[in-house]
Image (cartoon, rainbow, N blue to C red):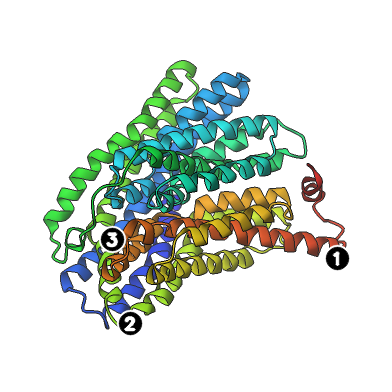
Amino acid sequence: MLGNLKNSLSESFRTIMPIVLIVVVLSIFVPISPSLLISFIISSILLIIGSALFTFGADISMMIIGEKIGSKLVKSKKIWLVLLVSFIIGTVVTIAEPDLRVLAEQLISIPSNVLILTISVGVGISLLLSSLRSIYGWDLNKILLIGYTITLIFIFFVSEEFVPVAFDSGGITTGTISLPFIMTLGIGLTANRTDKKAKESSFGLVSLCSLGPIIMVLLLGLFYTPEGSYNITDLIRLNINFKDYLNAFSVYFEEVLFSILPIIIVFVIYQLLSKDVTKTEIRKIIFGLIVTILGLTMFFMAANVGFMDMGYFLGEYIGGTDYKYLLIPFGMVMAFYISIAEPAVQVLNSQVEDLTGGNISKKTLNIGLALGVSVATGLSLIRIFTNTSFLYYIIPGQILSLILMFFTPKIFTAIAFDAGGATGGTLTAAFLLPIAIGICLATGTNVLTGAFGLAALVSLAPLITIQVIGIMYNLKMKNEHIENYDEEIVDLDKEE
């Protein structure tokens, strides 16, 4: 158990330290107040500890809950129960998702709870649909084609201010809490299948759970008018003291308890009905939940006191100077290292390496994904400086990703769209987005149409990158006539 905690600390350290080092170097050239710099460093340390505790606690509590419920659903063979529980799980775990709450709290024009509830219901409906697909082996490509065609149609009936927010919701939603539940459920639902589509069906749940929130937020945009405006003095605290941390801890502890409570209720109801969890497992789950709550509270406290303040400040200050365009390479380098260190991305890379028998190495995919995310971040910042519509980026990108589906082995398409939900993670919402908001305020650009949409473009990069890698892998295998060529991938590629 201590080894798992050490691994979590190591992963958190690798994720956050590149940002700390870059900011420290920038402090030599940018007049950052000592109070803000010290609070940023303190918040970074707390963020590392909080993120590690949260990941460690979720692994020993959420994973057990997810595996138990998923296994029980498969054994019950009751479709109505599978659908009901899928909807409930999708909804309640998304409410507790830290990445989503970080995003929602920066969107001052829409009440946080309204946005969170809308997105959570979208994930619930998507997980319900995903469960049906896993059970019956429905074609993921057709579902994605229909779903994204609907989103592209909705775009033209919704206020342009809602579109970037909607696509960001899809990129941010499937994070650290929801991913274990969703992936565990998918593996459980396909465990008893022996057909060639079983492996393909175990992937793709995350992609559908990223699609649902986009559609739901676009629907919200049909009935809701954004209100409110951003003021840099309300976002940045240049003088931060110990009291700010205490106040934030109190506020976010209450919010985290409220967020985790639905998951606890689902587990208690499950245990009362099934009595399937042993006393040892219950003690482990309780301990894990306590650690999760503590870690998540520290995470929110650190992100909102000092960490995001630094992002707002750097974006607003540098964005108002003659050197503002330096933020483009700065953001690209930041995004590159964030992507490489993202734990969910590392898990995904390992899956692809295993799937291709080592023909596509983890290192190759790592660099490919990181470059894609880096370019997407650069394009997002260029879009702010040129005040270009988000539609000019997202529509061609989505159309390209859908076209690639017809040339890519289907299992690579499933992995690619799953990766889109894994890459737009915590630090994108907690640091890169604040920088983008700061730039908008410095340049007079509309925050909703300028800053938001960054996470969406970051999440779009893997859709294109992994599908292109899939095409290259397929061609390589066919050209070289390798004897151990994965016939399952060939079969999947040929099926209707």
* Disc 2: which residue: 323
Disc 3: which residue: 308
Disc 2 from disc 1: Cα separation: 50 Å
Q: Residue at x 35, y 74 (%)?
A: 21
Most foreground residue, 198 or 165: 165
How far across and how far down the image is residue 93, in percent? Answer: 42, 36
Mark 3, secondary structure of its residue = helix
Residue 269 placement, left or right of 251? right
N-term-proximal mark, 1 vs 3: 3
**Residue 116 sits in quarter:** top left
Q: Residues within 10 Å of mark 1 (few under 14, many from 20)?
A: few
Discs 2/1, front: 2
Q: Nearer the viewer, residue 240 or 172?
A: 172
Q: Quadrant of the C terminus?
A: top right
The numbered disc on residue 480 is 1
Residue found 31% across the figure and 50% down from its top: 107
Percent position (x, y) of residue 290? 32, 39
In the rendered structure, which amino acid carries the disc numbered 1? Glu
Q: Amino acid at mark 2?
A: Tyr
Residue 427 seen: no
Query: Which kind of residue does numbered mark 3 sit on?
Result: Met
Q: Residue at x 61, y 55 (%)?
A: 399
Q: Secondary structure at mark 2?
A: loop
Q: CA distance from mark 1 to mark 3?
A: 50 Å
Label 3 – label 2 distance at C-alpha? 21 Å
Residue at horizontal 51 percent and vertical 50 percent from the top:
421
